[in-house]
Amino acid sequence: MKGPVLGVFESMAVDGYEQVLYGYDPVSGLRTIIAIHSTALGPALGGTRFYPYSSEEEALVDVLRLARGMTYKAAAAGLDLGGGKAVILGDSRNRGADSERLLRAYGRIVDSLQGRYITAEDVGTTSEDMEMIRRETQWALGIPIPEGGSGDPSPMTARGVMGAVRAVAVHLWGSPDLAGRRFALQGVGKVGGSFARMLVEAGAEVVVSDAHAPTAEAVSNELGAKLVECDEIMTVDCDVLSPCALGAVLTPETIPTLSCQAIVGCANNQLLTDEDATTIAQRGILYAPDFVINAGGLINVAEELRGYAPERAMHRVDAIERATATILAIAHEHAITPHAAAVLRAERRIKEIGDLRRFRRNGDDRN
């Protein structure tokens, strides 16, 4: 017991996490971890990932990485929100008869945080799941549109990445036209599948892979896209590599094998470490920072906090194209990587606005 507990605190201390909460329901088998990285800009908002992790340690590492990424994503998007994330350990495709109990038990755990953490949809969860969780807590977003929510955020995430692709195309090739450009998509689930469809509509050539073979085959057949095995997709000769599945796929082992001009993908935390961004740049490959370009889903669900309006949400998501262009220009001007430019911009906002929020809160307390 002593070793693992100490490991959790050490992990939290490295990047300044505020809180990690473990939850368990013995009847449904719920095992969940919620990580709050920062509430400097506001309550921590981040999705719930329902995934069959091989161990509790793997789940902890993932939720910590994801929570930190959400802090930077919200800050870079200009939202008054902090960063958090949750994972449920298990196979979302095989939940069993206790699915309702599991989700409602999870909702009660979210509610215990009294709004410090707001959850939403992520890998393995749906807008219908959010509606179920909402029965136990008000702190769940992304509920179905008929219920007054924003629904599935995947299309908005893909829409934002599509805008980022156009910004990258202008930066590299002088035109936003994607016709004839070749994209290799690692993962074609809810977000990756939407992104693939948009690319095909824009005239791009698409190569796809997915760890879930039926999903990959269905998207390949629907779009007439070339299908390759998962272990091949990272080495496909293409204009743009698009990691759209899980994170930490850009590593010292995979980066030397890449054969692309740019990396623009939907997945969170694509870099294993920040240093990998430098290695990518040294290979002459442009990496669009994931937490900037895939913020569309976060922006979309955040709109529910003030009453969801689709037109307003789309307008804010479309600003990702301009934000990406700005980051690329800053990186070029200062001879740094786009990832470094994005991190500096996000951290500046967290420090300046976060300090202001604390000052105002302390002032209110004194009054």
Image (tube, rainbow, N blue to C red):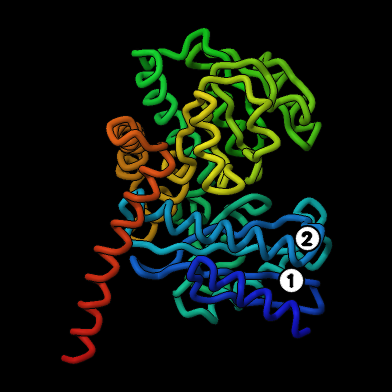
Describe residue 242's horizontal placement relative to residue 28 as left or right: left
Amino acid type, mark 1: Arg
Amino acid type, mark 2: Gly
* Pointer 1 or 2: first along the chain: 1
Q: Are marks 1 and 2 in contact (CB under 8 Å)?
A: yes
Q: Quadrant of the N terminus?
A: bottom right
Q: Residues within 10 Å of mark 1 (few under 14, many from 20)?
A: some
Q: Is residue 318 visible?
A: no
Q: Residue at x 53, y 76 (%)?
A: 19
Q: Quadrant of the C terminus?
A: bottom left
Foreground pick, 134 / 38: 38
Quadrant of the rendered image containing residue 39: bottom left
Q: Is residue 104 above or below residue 128?
A: below
Secondary structure beneath disc 2?
loop
Counting from the top left corner in percent of width and height, residue 279 is at: 55, 35
Point out which mark residue 31 bears. 1
Q: Residue at x 29, y 36 (%)?
A: 334
Foreground pick, 47 / 236: 236
Q: Is residue 305 above or below residue 275?
A: below
